[in-house]
Image (tube, grey):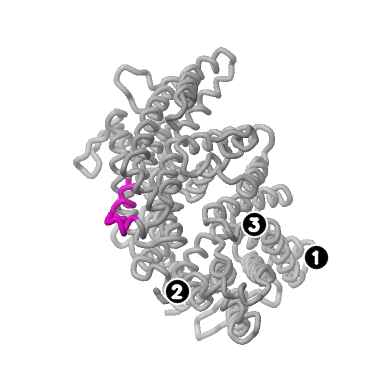
Amino acid sequence: MTLFLEQLLNGVQFGVMLFLLAAGLTLIFGIMGVINLAHGSIYMIGAYAGTWVATETGSFWLGIPAALTAAAVAGVAIEFLVVRRLYQRDHLDQVLATFGLILIFNQTVTILFGRQPLFVSMPALLDGSVELLPGLFYPIYRLAIIVVGLLVAVGLYLLINKTRIGMLVRAGSTNREMVRALGVDIRLLYTLVFGLGALLAGLAGFMAGPILAVQVGMGEQILITTFVVVVIGGVGSIRGAFFASLVLGIVDTGLRAYLPGLLRQVMVGSEADALGAGISSMGIYLLMAIVLLIRPKGLFIRNS
Amino acid sequence: METSLKRPVLLASVVIALIALPLVADATGYTALTSLATRVLIYGIAAASLNFVLGYGGMVSFGHAAFFGIGGYVVGILYQHYTLGEPLLGFIPGTNQMLITLPAAIVISGLMAALIGALSLRTGGVQFIMITLAFAQMLFFLFVSLKTYGGDDGLIIRRANELPGLNMRDKQTVYYVCLAVAVLFFFMLWRLVNSRFGNVIVGLRQSERRIAAIGLPAYRYKLMAFVISGMGCGLAGALMANFLRFASPDMLHWTKSGELMVMVILGGVGTLFGPLIGAAVFIVLETLLASWTENWQLGLGLILLFVVLYTQGGVQALGARLFGRRA
């Protein structure tokens, strides 16, 4: 039971990380209609900038503003220099241009930081574990990630549903042309949304640092999973992204934790591990395929 | 197209140049040129297949590496069972005969394309891009986890498949085989594109509703196009496995799908030979940049960005604009 709860929390933690990325991606997707493959690169930039500053200064906390600033600056720069020219183009050009951006960022980071992964140690405050239930110890750091993620979700909910900017964002994701026709400076709105998405991606990247290795290519791994989240949740729907992230995080973690064990009952250990890992990795894609076949626009979009 | 004799003459001279290429490579000492050209031909076939759905049909598939990889694995798996001497699934004997492996690769990738296409084509737009990607990733992880066939490390094919009367251990022979296959492939593609079927596919890109209004079953046409395209990629994958003597999950990775797309766009979307030119540009650039600097990806990324932002219609269109004539 404690193992199950622990895996559940791990799943939520992974889901929350996915949400931080998916929130920005789904807005960029939904409002501007741009497929941004470079979102994973922004995640990587946040991770590298934050980790580097944290290592140089010796303070984990100084890494946070560094990661956020670097990611937001990179995001706004990408929007201003490249993505802005792609709004009117078809998806093909967008995929290609942002694919080019991935190559550029990966190589630039390799030149700057080398191929060795960076590591950052956890701050003393968040190191160690806490006893949640009798016998259930859980790392404080992972709990902190969950809390931050949920806070961001609440903040985004308020921003989108209670503020003027949020109203424009909602309007933009429903009918872009109409918002423009009403005299809203849509370019500024686009840049803001892109910057916000980048900020969240950078935050996710930095928080992932102490858990995963900070290395080139970390962005692409999580990017594809994030796309799965966005598509399952429905393009442009933050609510959809939130639920899809949590479900996907839990399903993925659960499969990885339990499938090899189940397979071992029927086959040899090493083969069961390999097959289990393979099928677990396939799980989320299978889920997406099923969802799309039943609801081609995603779970949280009404089919018109 | 028929208005001038320029095109056939140009094509004939390109083919002659390609036939002479290994001889020139040997004479000048650049023997690596033959390998380079083989890769260009193989990727050209794959990219042109992708272009059939992507450029002509307007279906943006982000998962065509799946069929490329399946083609490669058909060759690899049949070869493994041939060397081990035990039949696949207990009744399919392995083989190292190219006359069997190539058609097998085409048929099996076609079947997979039928399955994936039948499901994916129920969606459209962004969802289509993502669902094709999802299926390709599923197959990628499947092959990664298949320890029997090498898993993560891939499958080594000790010798290229045999063709009666030819010495396939010679790289030049492999090149000529690929060239022959490529010529045949592009001839058939040309016939296909200019057929009634091809016209319907182009019509589908322009307006699916119009095609449906004429009374043609749009879904069935799209699925057929998707299958044909998958078969082409499978053929390319089978050739690649023979050329590299290696099949690995990398052939199915999503970045490979991305590369194929890049080749199509570099060369010009919706043109017959554009993808071949795109493949040539991509592979030559990659090789050149990699020989100059370790950081070749940076250059490649910048070039990609430039091509997308400032040229519409790829290298062919850029050339046409620079030299002031129609492509």
Residue behind mark 1: A57
Q: Residues within 10 Å of mark 1 (few under 14, many from 20)?
A: few
Residue behind mark 3: A85
Q: Amino acid type of disc 1?
A: Thr
Q: CA distance from mark 3 to mark 1?
A: 38 Å
Residue behind mark 2: A247
Please, which residue is most extreme toward the front here?
B3
Which range of residues does the magenta coloring cover? Answer: B211-227
Which residue lies at the image location 75% right of the left edge and 65% below the top edge? A54
Callout count:
3
Q: Quadrant of the N terminus of chain B?
A: top left
**Residue A48 magenta-highlighted:** no
Q: Nearer the viewer, residue A133 or B307?
A: B307
The percent position of residue B283, horizontal first and vertical second, equals 55, 35
The percent position of residue B308, horizontal first and vertical second, equals 60, 48
Chain-order first, disc 3 or disc 1: 1
Q: Is residue A218 visible?
A: yes
Q: Nearer the viewer, residue B167 or B226?
A: B226
